[in-house]
Image: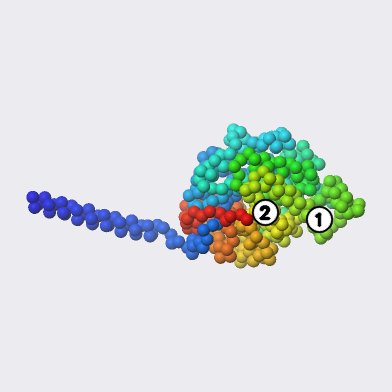
């Protein structure tokens, strides 16, 4: 009997020793395998925008059902709370649209319709996002810019605005100026070549001052607001007009009516001429804002744009006035910079300081492009700079470069770092 008891006690001791050893080994491995939490994982607020743009450009995520579902699940698991899925770009919708069908003859983007067999991908995004606790703010990407060979432009050539020499092509020199202001100097040339091949030299601009164009864009946006359980709607840095445009018959006639028959100045940088066109765009945004609120009062009207001087001088976007006059519920400033000092410099500009406390004001951070890669350490530094200055949050351009085999760091490493940046789930700031 005594021998049996001693044997059991011996077995118990062995189990205890083994158990303690396993526990110690587990703790040791956890310490080795889990990177230390960096300073920027500390969050001083319980509310923060954590968003990402989802586009079809240089990305396949929309075209297979498992890809978009996996993306939304990963974003939720890593404590993001907002997605901005593309709803319109390049003259096409990315949902079955009666408005688009009526105007262009196509109800949605042909490639999307082919790969997804005509399914309503935007509806799936809403369903999966809300199931994962993500808010969805459909994004009208590229605003009024459209390919010259698109069905929309071919059917409605009179909707296109022009320069004084009647040129309707979006200037390469303007794109060069934009790239120098927005992107790391080290990659300007290669990205410019890429854009020239795929975007810039083959695009024209729908006239945002033309009533017919305004009605079309307004109908598209209201269709999305009415058709889906939207949390908001977003327009971006192309919701405006390149400064060299505005010499089309419709705009000239309207200007003459308001200026005792005088023609617009030949100098497209004339301050009064610039302000007049900017005011027309502001008036349309006011109409858009009020129309959305009449349909769905709680719908967030979101704007994502570039630093103010650049937005106004290049695209006639007077977003400082938009915010001050109450036509925007959420603003995201696109600060796509490689260096931390140039990034912080934009956060300290007067237009930012003048408007940032009026509404939730977040910062757009470049996660990378096909040619411009961003290491995760730089992304972490920029997120911390945003938090240090108590902005409303961050949004990343774009999904495909958050963590994938396109990135300079391994996907696993980047996901670990994002989880460190967003260790717990938080809600978005309340729109005023």
- Lateral position of residue 23 relative to residue 113, left or right: left
Mark 1 nearby-residue class (10 Å; few <14, some 14–19, many ≥20): some
Q: Where is residue 307 in the image (x, y as percent from the top left)?
A: 68, 60
In the image, residue 368 sits, relative to residue 127, either above or below, namely below
Q: Residue at x 23, y 57 (%)?
A: 17
Give the residue displayed 45% in from the left and 61% down from the top. Answer: 37
Residue placed most toward the observer, 345 or 180: 345
Relative vertical location of residue 176 with respect to residue 88 in this rendering, above or below = below
Residue 294 seen from this side: yes
Q: Which of 304 and 431 is in front in this view?
A: 431
Residue at the extreme right of the image, as rendered: 261
Q: Is residue 139 visible?
A: no
Q: Which residue is drawn at 60% across and 52% down?
A: 397
Residue at the spot of label 1:
276
Q: Nearer the viewer, mark 1 or mark 2?
A: 2
Q: How far apart are marks 1 and 2 (CA)?
A: 20 Å
Look at the numbered discs 1 and 2 and tell me whether their residues touch, using CB distance below 8 Å.
no
**Residue 151 occupies quadrant:** top right
Q: Residue 97, how many percent across, how many down?
A: 66, 37
Instruction: Please say which color scheme the image uses.
Output: rainbow
Q: In this view, does 166 lie above or below 342?
A: above
The x, y position of residue 199, in whole percent, is 69, 47
Which residue position is annotated with label 2?
328
């Amino acid at each position: 009997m005594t021998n049996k008891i001693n044997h059991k006690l011996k077995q118990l001791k062995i189990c205890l020793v083994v158990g303690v050893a396993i526990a110690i080994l587990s703790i040791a491995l956890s310490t080795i395998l889990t990177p230390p939490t960096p300073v920027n994982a500390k969050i001083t607020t319980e509310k923060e925008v954590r968003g990402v743009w989802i586009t079809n450009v240089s990305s396949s995520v929309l075209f297979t059902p498992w890809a978009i579902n996996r993306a939304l699940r990963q974003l939720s698991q890593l404590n993001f709370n907002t997605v901005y899925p593309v709803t319109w770009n390049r003259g096409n919708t990315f949902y079955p649209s009666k408005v688009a069908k009526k105007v262009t003859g196509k109800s949605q983007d042909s490639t999307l319709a082919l790969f997804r067999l005509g399914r309503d991908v935007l509806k799936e995004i809403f369903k999966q996002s809300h199931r994962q606790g993500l808010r969805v703010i459909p994004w009208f990407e590229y605003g009024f810019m459209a390919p010259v060979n698109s069905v929309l432009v071919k059917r409605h050539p009179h909707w296109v605005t022009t320069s004084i020499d009647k040129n309707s092509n979006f200037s390469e020199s303007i794109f060069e100026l934009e790239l120098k202001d927005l992107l790391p100097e080290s990659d300007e040339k290669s990205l410019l070549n890429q854009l020239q091949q795929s975007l810039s030299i083959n695009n024209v601009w729908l006239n945002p001052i033309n009533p017919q164009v305004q009605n079309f864009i307004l109908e598209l946006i209201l269709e999305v607001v009415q058709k889906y359980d939207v949390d908001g709607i977003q327009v971006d840095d192309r919701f405006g007009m390149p400064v060299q445009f505005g010499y089309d018959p419709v705009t000239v006639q309207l200007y003459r009516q308001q200026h005792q028959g005088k023609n617009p100045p030949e100098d497209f940088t004339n301050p009064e001429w610039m302000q007049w066109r900017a005011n027309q765009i502001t008036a349309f945004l006011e109409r858009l804002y009020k129309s959305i609120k009449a349909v769905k009062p709680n719908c967030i009207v979101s704007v994502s744009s570039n630093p103010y001087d650049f937005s106004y001088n290049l695209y006639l976007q007077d977003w400082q006035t938009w915010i001050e006059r109450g036509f925007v519920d959420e603003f995201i400033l696109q600060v796509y910079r490689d260096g931390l000092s140039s990034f912080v410099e934009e956060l300290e500009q007067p237009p930012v300081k003048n408007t940032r406390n009026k509404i939730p004001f977040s910062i757009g951070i470049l996660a990378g492009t096909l040619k411009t890669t961003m290491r995760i350490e730089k992304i972490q530094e920029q997120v911390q700079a945003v938090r240090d200055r108590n902005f409303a949050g961050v949004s990343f351009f774009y999904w495909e470069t958050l963590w994938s085999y396109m990135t300079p760091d391994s996907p696993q490493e980047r996901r670990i770092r994002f989880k460190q940046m967003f260790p717990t789930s938080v809600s978005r700031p309340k729109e005023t």
